[in-house]
């Protein structure tokens, strides 16, 4: 499955990817320049900030702002727009303020108007809570206003934007993302200005040929710092529309808003219809101001009505194709991505809380009433002991095989034979086994040419004498009661349809470092919660080959071990379900395995697991959503596929959105999510450890758990998907055994009444640790004394 | 890392490190000179900050190769902080006493708040200063970036060894994001940090590569053109993207600085001349040792020395010995006074570095015993402390005989 030795698929995939990339490039080349071309009339000239000297003097009055070139000829001082060459007369006051500067920033605006005007301008909206009451208030008093809207919010709340436009208000550009244009590079400036305009044109069908620069302030020093942004706006054909009266409505509650003096001069007011939750200030302020200003003879206008330079800048237009392209592009980034994240978040919440909650409930329920069942099973086992073959497939395991056999040899169950299939090892594995056979005649060695683990196990099956097979990995240490705990379920099996009993695999070297501690917690949580829950549903999807008991007949019926997937235990478990065998788990049949202690080894192992499980499920895909297989087909397997596929498709989006969120509003949001998921995981872990009777101090890893887990999962997903597309065979990636095991003299397993103390590695069984790692000098390893069981025995 | 590389590095470490020490000393001299003179061509002559980050990266990689990561991080942070604390204990009260004003429009100085003060304790962001002290705390950004790179190093080293090219391109992508406008620098602390990580992260990673011996294996016929391209790219970017206030000064244009520094570091760390000749010039040899032993102090207090030198010169020298209009004489006098003041500061406060490094405390870092021979290549490399010194400096007068017999 997934393997394509011809490489044709990979070639096809690469061709397709290249074609898609080419199409995307051509598409961008065709659309981007046109979309970023300003729909407004632009002049023939260019002017840069350095030409103006950086901070030209600010002259004049009015809500609009522009850079003008000052032309001094024969004592006459005139000015002209450096982009359009339009000549502008300067008032005497302005000429004096200009001094000798070659360029000035001129405030200007208004025109010959019969009555004094007030232009209300709103920023930071539209807001679903505050914009509707404001629109209602304005409609009530029949007052038009000007709304400056960012493209980002416009695409999210396009209904409100349309509503405002339909009510006769004027819509102005506030850039796409409310970014400080003076600090942005030139391409970004152009994109912010032009896309902001185009989005509004596409939504409202009105031009938005004037722009309020973000972070505009009334004072001259701040205005001078905007010079680069003003130039960018002029260059792209936009009129910069500021204000001349700040009401201070965004200040915190308790401060007073500043009403404009109603002295007959024209006013342009800065107000906000969003941005903070104290907008009732703005509504109240306007409800009071409007009647008073009308009584004082003022007329309320939009900015284009009040300013000659803005005439026609809000005119109805037919949205062009490029306007719509801009609308779609901005919507994709700022509206649709947010919606997708919202659904993903719901999915994640569901995944974490509902599924882990369900698992916990099932695991706890399964716990109850199980004792009686097990006692019955133990009693049955005492009357009748079926013949059991313990089967080990070994490939270059000289470091650990003797120790494994020794731990098996002290089993309390009268095992018929310990069958070791040496899969063509090139080291001293066979000699080690022969030595063990001399001490314990039940040990039997079968040698074969190297054919792989599945082949070795199948070979073992053909010569096994027992009806029940207990498989143990060559690097795994078992407790004296593991075998009997596994086998008792068969003794108590009422209908003879029990196919396999999964044991519990724990990490034996958890004290080595954070990597092994992390895995220890994962094993415990997963096994005692997730797999217990699966057992309660009769839907165990993976019986670990490292420690399990099987009915030989069931394996043979299922066709033996297959080599076509890398997770032969998962494949076999699914095959058992398929042929109607039951599968269960014994929580007391504990085996300790040596977990990879470096990130590199962990990655290799997990690639094999993830890839293998995906292979096995793909191979048995007809079981997915198939009622015949009960919970396994309807829930466990689909859920696994979903938990692989959803992140596979959405992880890049989530990562980008997380970065955007951090930039926009600090790390708080991400930390909150992290805390929520960590809390959920801590609950599961606590229940798991409690059920397993393990040391609750392992909970200390929980905060680190997600930090390791999320990048690991991301890497595994993409590495496996990539390898599957490539169709190359993933190597066996065998872990180099160090033989490192913690001392498990302390009771690590639950004490089960009736089975005697489930003590692991009793004092009479010396744990032989052979350190075979040539890469690490003995002295370096000795630093980890605590990790080595009987380290002295190793050297 | 293979055992072979480790041996290769340590076998010649004694001789090699003289070159490294000299680079570090040169970097410090250049920093002080630039802060004093503001000549735009000085960063072109020798991009100090990139070199300092690269040397620090190499040292951290070397420590991580020998000890477990937690103890490396602990000891490195321990060496970094005390000097900063001493500076804070002395400077913050003075700034408060001078009224702690700041200019929010011109972005000179920051407001005094508890968070800013916290960064004087652990510099996760640049510690705050008033507008009066803005110049004095200017160098502190390096400590912040160093701290972050240090904390990221175990992960970075793993990533770099696994995917060297991808990891090396990470900082460049960050720079590209800021330069292209995909991300607009909003002047926040985090943006400032990310931008500096993008600018100098690649140099730090080259330090890893140098330690691992990867750089040495690259053929010069590849390295020289690559380095030239990077240098020219940096310079070209600076010339085409000049700033209004500082023009083409590479030091003030992040992407130009990053490219130029990367090119220079690539070449400097690849050529690796022996520099055994330094040992034959005793005063120079000792001076280099002193500057390395007190690198953090010199770096941190450089601007204080410059500021005091300017004040002293204005008050006592100008007009008495030469006319105030004589620019070159004035600069020369400032230069001499700066280093004199700095020498006093090193005597007064430099011992903090010994305390931080858990070495025998010495007021004068001047080596006591003359050294006539370069370090014997077959002798065991100077261990522990020399690699553990704070910023980028190797610890102590670097011969074991001269440091505390703590091992």
Image (cartoon, coloured by chain):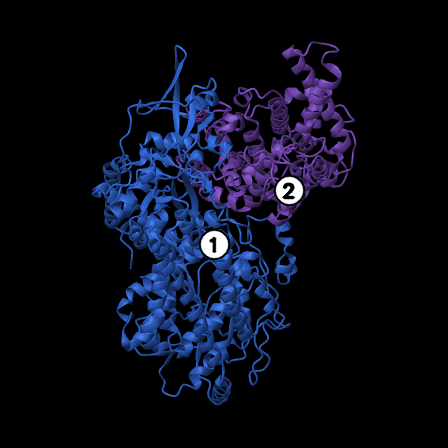
Residue A721 is situated, as x and y percent measured from the top left of the image, at 34, 54
Quadrant for residue A107, please give it. Answer: top left
The quarter of the displayed image where residue A263 is located: top left
Chain under callout 1: A
Q: Which residue is mark 1?
A: A281
**Residue drawn at x 78%, y 33% as measured from the top left:** B362
Question: What tint does the image give chain B?
Answer: purple
Q: Is residue B214 above or below residue A735?
A: above
From mark 2 to mark 1, how far is it between C-alphas?
A: 31 Å
Chain letter for the blue colouring in the rendering? A
Q: Residue at x 52, y 25 (%)?
A: B271
Specify whether disc 2 shares its chain with disc 1: no
Q: Residues within 10 Å of mark 2 (few under 14, many from 20)?
A: some
Above/below status of A567 relative to A760: above
Residue at the image position 46 percent from the left and 31 percent from the top: B255
Regarding residue A611, the answer to whether it shows in the image is: no
């Amino acid at each position: 499955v997934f393997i394509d030795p011809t490489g044709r698929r990979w070639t096809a995939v690469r061709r397709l990817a290249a074609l898609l990339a080419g199409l995307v490039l051509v598409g961008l080349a065709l659309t981007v320049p046109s979309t970023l071309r300003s729909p407004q009339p632009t002049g023939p000239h260019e002017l840069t900030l350095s030409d103006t000297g950086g901070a030209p003097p600010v002259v004049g009055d009015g809500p609009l702002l522009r850079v003008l070139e000052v032309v001094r000829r024969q004592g006459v001082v005139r000015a002209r727009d450096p982009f359009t060459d339009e000549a502008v007369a300067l008032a005497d006051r302005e000429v004096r303020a200009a001094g000798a500067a070659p360029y000035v920033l001129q405030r200007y605006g208004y025109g010959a108007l019969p009555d004094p005007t007030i232009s209300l301008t709103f920023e930071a909206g539209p807001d679903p809570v505050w914009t509707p009451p404001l629109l209602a208030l304005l409609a009530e008093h029949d007052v038009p206003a000007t709304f400056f809207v960012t493209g980002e919010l416009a695409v999210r709340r396009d209904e409100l934007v349309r509503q405002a436009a339909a009510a006769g208000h004027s819509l102005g550009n506030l850039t796409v993302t409310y970014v400080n244009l003076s600090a942005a590079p030139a391409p970004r400036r152009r994109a912010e200005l032009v896309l902001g305009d185009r989005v509004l044109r596409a939504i409202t069908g009105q031009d938005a040929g004037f722009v309020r620069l973000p972070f505009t302030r009334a004072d001259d020093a701040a205005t001078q710092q905007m010079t680069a942004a003003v130039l960018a706006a002029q260059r792209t054909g936009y009129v910069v529309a500021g204000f001349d009266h700040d009401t201070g409505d965004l200040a915190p509650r308790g401060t007073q808003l500043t009403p404009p003096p109603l002295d007959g001069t024209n006013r342009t007011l800065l107000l906000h219809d969003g941005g903070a939750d104290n907008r009732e200030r703005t509504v109240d302020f306007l409800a009071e101001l409007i009647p008073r200003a009308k009584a004082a003879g003022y007329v309320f206008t939009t900015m284009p009505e009040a300013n000659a330079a803005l005439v026609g800048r809000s005119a109805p237009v037919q949205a062009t194709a490029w306007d719509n392209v801009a609308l779609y592009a901005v919507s994709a980034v700022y509206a649709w991505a947010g919606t997708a994240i919202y659904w993903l978040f719901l999915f994640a919440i569901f995944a974490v809380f509902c599924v882990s909650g369900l698992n916990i409930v099932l695991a706890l329920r399964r716990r109850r009433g199980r004792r009686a069942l097990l006692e019955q099973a133990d009693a049955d086992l005492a009357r009748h002991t079926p013949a059991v073959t313990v089967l080990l497939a070994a490939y270059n395991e000289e470091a650990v095989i003797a120790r494994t056999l020794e731990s098996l040899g002290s089993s309390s169950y009268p095992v018929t034979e310990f069958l070791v299939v040496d899969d063509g090892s090139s080291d001293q594995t066979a000699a080690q086994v022969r030595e063990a056979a001399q001490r314990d005649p039940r040990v039997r060695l079968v040698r074969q040419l190297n054919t792989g683990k599945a082949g070795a196990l199948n070979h073992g099956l053909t010569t096994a004498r027992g009806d029940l097979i207990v498989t143990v990995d060559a690097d795994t240490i078992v407790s004296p009661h593991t075998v009997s705990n596994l086998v008792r379920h068969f003794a108590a099996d009422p209908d003879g349809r029990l196919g396999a009993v999964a044991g519990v695999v724990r990490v034996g070297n958890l004290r080595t470092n954070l990597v092994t501690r992390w895995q220890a917690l994962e094993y415990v949580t997963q096994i005692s919660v997730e797999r217990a829950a699966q057992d309660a549903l009769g839907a165990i999807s993976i019986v670990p080959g490292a420690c399990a008991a099987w009915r030989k007949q069931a394996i043979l019926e299922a066709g033996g071990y297959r080599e076509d997937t890398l997770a032969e235990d998962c494949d076999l478990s699914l095959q058992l379900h398929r042929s109607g065998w039951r599968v269960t788990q014994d929580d007391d049949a504990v085996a300790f395995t040596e977990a990879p202690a470096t990130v590199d080894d962990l990655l290799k192992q997990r690639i094999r697991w993830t890839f293998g499980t995906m292979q096995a499920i793909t191979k048995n895909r007809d079981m997915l959503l198939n009622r015949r297989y009960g919970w396994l087909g309807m829930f466990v397997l689909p859920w696994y596929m979903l938990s692989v596929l959803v992140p596979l498709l959405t992880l890049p989006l989530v990562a980008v959105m997380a970065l955007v969120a951090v930039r926009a509003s600090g790390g708080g949001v991400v930390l909150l999510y992290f805390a929520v998921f960590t809390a959920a995981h801590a609950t599961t872990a606590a229940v798991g450890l409690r059920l397993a009777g393990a040391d609750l101090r392992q909970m200390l890893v929980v905060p680190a758990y997600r930090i390791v887990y999320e990048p690991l999962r991301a890497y595994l997903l993409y590495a496996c998907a990539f390898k599957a597309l490539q169709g190359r065979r993933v190597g066996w990636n065998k872990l180099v055994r160090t033989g490192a095991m913690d001392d498990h003299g302390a009771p690590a397993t639950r004490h089960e009444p009736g089975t005697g103390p489930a003590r692991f590695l009793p004092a009479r069984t010396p744990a032989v640790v052979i350190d075979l790692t040539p890469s690490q000098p003995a002295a370096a390893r000795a630093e980890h004394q605590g990790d080595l069981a009987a380290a002295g025995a190793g050297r | 890392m293979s055992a072979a590389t480790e041996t290769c590095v340590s076998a010649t470490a004694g001789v090699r490190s003289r070159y490294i020490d000299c680079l570090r000393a040169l970097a410090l001299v250049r920093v002080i000179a630039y802060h004093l003179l503001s000549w735009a061509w000085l960063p072109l002559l020798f991009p100090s900050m990139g070199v300092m980050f690269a040397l620090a990266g190499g040292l951290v990689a070397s420590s991580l190769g020998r000890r477990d990561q937690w103890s490396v991080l602990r000891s490195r942070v321990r060496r970094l902080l005390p000097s900063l604390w001493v500076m804070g204990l002395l400077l913050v009260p003075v700034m408060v006493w001078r009224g702690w004003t700041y200019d929010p429009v011109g972005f000179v100085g920051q407001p005094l708040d508890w968070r800013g003060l916290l960064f004087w304790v652990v510099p996760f962001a640049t510690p705050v200063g008033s507008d009066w002290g803005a110049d004095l705390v200017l160098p502190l950004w390096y400590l912040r970036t160093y701290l972050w790179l240090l904390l990221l190093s175990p992960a970075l080293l793993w990533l770099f060894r696994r995917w060297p090219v991808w990891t090396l391109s990470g900082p460049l992508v960050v720079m590209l994001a800021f330069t292209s406008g995909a991300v607009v620098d909003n002047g926040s602390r985090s943006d400032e940090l990310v931008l500096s990580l993008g600018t100098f992260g690649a140099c730090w990673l080259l330090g890893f590569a140098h330690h691992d011996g990867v750089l040495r294996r690259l053929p010069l016929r590849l390295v020289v053109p690559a380095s030239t391209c990077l240098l020219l790219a940096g310079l070209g970017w600076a010339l085409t993207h000049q700033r209004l206030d500082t023009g083409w000064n590479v030091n003030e244009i992040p992407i130009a600085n990053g490219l130029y520094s990367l090119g220079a570091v690539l070449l400097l760390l690849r050529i690796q001349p022996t520099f055994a000749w330094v040992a034959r010039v005793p005063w120079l040899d000792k001076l280099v040792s002193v500057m390395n032993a007190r690198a953090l102090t010199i770096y941190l207090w450089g601007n204080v020395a410059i500021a005091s030198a300017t004040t002293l010169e204005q008050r006592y020298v100008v007009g008495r010995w030469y006319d105030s209009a004589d620019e070159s004489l004035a600069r020369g006098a400032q230069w001499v006074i700066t280093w004199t003041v700095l020498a006093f500061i090193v005597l007064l406060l430099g011992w903090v570095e010994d305390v931080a490094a858990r070495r025998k405390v010495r007021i004068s870092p001047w080596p006591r015993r003359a050294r006539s021979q370069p370090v014997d290549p077959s002798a065991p490399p100077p261990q522990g402390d020399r690699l553990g010194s704070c910023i980028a400096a190797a610890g102590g007068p670097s011969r074991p005989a001269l440091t505390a017999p703590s091992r």
